[in-house]
Image: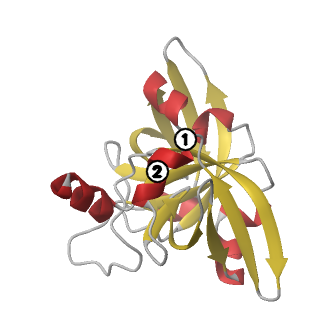
Amino acid sequence: MFTGIIEELGTVQAIQSPKNLLVLNVRAPRIFVGTRPGDSISVNGVCLTVAKMVKPGVFVFELMRETMDTTNLQSLKKGSRVNLERALKAGSRLGGHFVTGHIDGVGRIVKILKKKNFVEWQISFKDQTHWNRYLVPKGSIALDGVSLTVGEVKQNLFTVYLIPYTLKVTTFGHKKISDGINIEIDLLTKYVLKILK
């Protein structure tokens, strides 16, 4: 379980593709300290297990085919930056919202509007009609592992608003139109709808 508050921007050092796997080496010296093999880390919102640790500050993650097919991690290259967060400790402050690290789908940034002191993103799902029932204005959503508040919800897209701090401490400052972004719908919304159904 995570909170959607990014701890560090990691850098992809190497990518290997043995059969049925994608192996990522990610450098993150700050959160390397105190982390052990077997620990969970959110990488762009995807809950991954630390397979091993090589040289100071570098984690190794092993991704199954399912993870590659349903997230944007398959588009990473050497040098790509990734949002990182360690799993929530019991008793820690919950600064964002409950984030599981289980991605519901990959959206596309269809518009970036730069305003004074904030940026608006408009994001579309592949199957927006299905996902619209989970999107609530002023509700929570996780994009690439970042806890955000949903703005406007339309038939084929939704908006989020990014303050300068978020753009600085996450990968969002480098995103472009048409980039894929991992989306995790608010866990509580999914459970409420399931119960009502």
Q: Position of residue 75 (x, y in %)?
A: 68, 35
Looking at the picture, which amino acid does disc 2 mark? Answer: Trp
Front in this rendered view, residue 2 or 130: 130
Residue at coordinates 77% horizontally, 88% vertically from top-left?
A: 117
Front in this rendered view, residue 193 or 155: 155
Front in this rendered view, residue 156 or 117: 156
The type of colouring in the image is: secondary structure
Q: Where's the N terminus, which quadrant? A: bottom left
> Secondary structure under badge 2?
helix
Q: Position of residue 91 (x, y in %)?
A: 21, 78
Residue on which disc 2 sits: 131
- Whether residue 43 is visible here, answered yes or no, is no
> Secondary structure under badge 1?
loop
Residue farthest toward the top in the current orientation of the protein: 19
- Label 2: few (<14), some (14–19) or many (≥20) C-alpha neighbours in 10 Å: some
Question: Looking at the picture, does residue 188 appear above or below residue 81?
Answer: below
Residue at coordinates 33% horizontally, 78% vertically from top-left?
A: 94
Tally of numbered discs: 2
Residue on which disc 1 sits: 127
Marks 1 and 2 in Cβ contact (< 8 Å) = yes
